[in-house]
Image (cartoon, grey):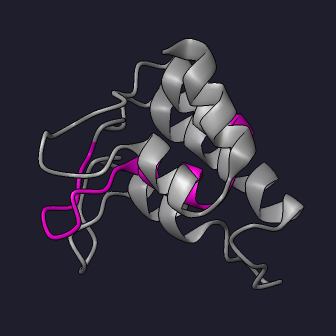
Amino acid sequence: MDVNSKDKDGAIPVFAVCKHGFHGNHKVAGRSAVTKQKRLQIVKVLLERSSDIDFQMKNTKMTCLHWTSFHDDIETTKLLIEKGAKMTVSEDSNTACDIAGFCNNKTIVDFFCSIA
């Protein structure tokens, strides 16, 4: 399996998981504890297989880090940073910290401030 192959929307698997979360039989919401746990597990596997950690959708300029910040998923956000995700991928878009701030996700903002 090519972990960087694009789906019909142009997203690669790691990006889709960070954006949508895990949608198995339970159809859990993007911010639930179960979704965050499953997201973390799947992202770990995909990164081990050399998935593009900084993949960016052209139309939104958002990355995996943006989406985990949006979903207030601190563990997956920390993993992405630990594995080398860039805080800023382009100068003309919001950072992941901006997204966390817009969403009032204080834990994520505090984390980004602690590593800046």
Would you place residue 87 above or below residue 28 in this image? Answer: above
Would you place residue 18 above or below residue 53 in this image? Answer: below
Which residue is drawn at the image coordinates 34% and 50% (left, top)?
A: 63
Q: Residue furthest right?
A: 33
Residue 83 located left or right of residue 23: left
| Residue 89 at x, y percent in the picture | 22, 37
Which residue is drawn at the image coordinates 87% and 59% (left, top)?
A: 33
| Residue 101 at x, y percent in the picture | 55, 52
Would you place residue 69 above or below residue 30 in this image? Answer: above
| Residue 64 forms part of the magenta stretch | yes
**Extent of the magenta region:** 55-75
Residue sitting nearer the eye, 92 or 67: 92
Is residue 41 visible to us here? no
Which residue is drawn at the image coordinates 35% and 43% (left, top)?
A: 95
Residue sitting nearer the eye, 90 or 49: 90
| Residue 114 at x, y percent in the picture | 63, 17
Based on the displayed image, in which of its 4 quarters is residue 113 positioned? top right
Would you place residue 19 above or below residue 105 in this image? Answer: below
Residue 62 located left or right of residue 102: left
| Residue 98 at x, y percent in the picture | 43, 48
| Residue 22 forms part of the magenta stretch | no
Is residue 40 visible to us here? yes
Residue 54 located left or right of residue 84: left
Residue 111 located left or right of residue 7: right
Residue sitting nearer the eye, 26 or 95: 95
Which residue is drawn at the image coordinates 56% and 14% (left, top)?
A: 115
- Could you tell me how many numbered marks the image carries? 0
Based on the displayed image, in which of its 4 quarters is residue 45 positioned? top right
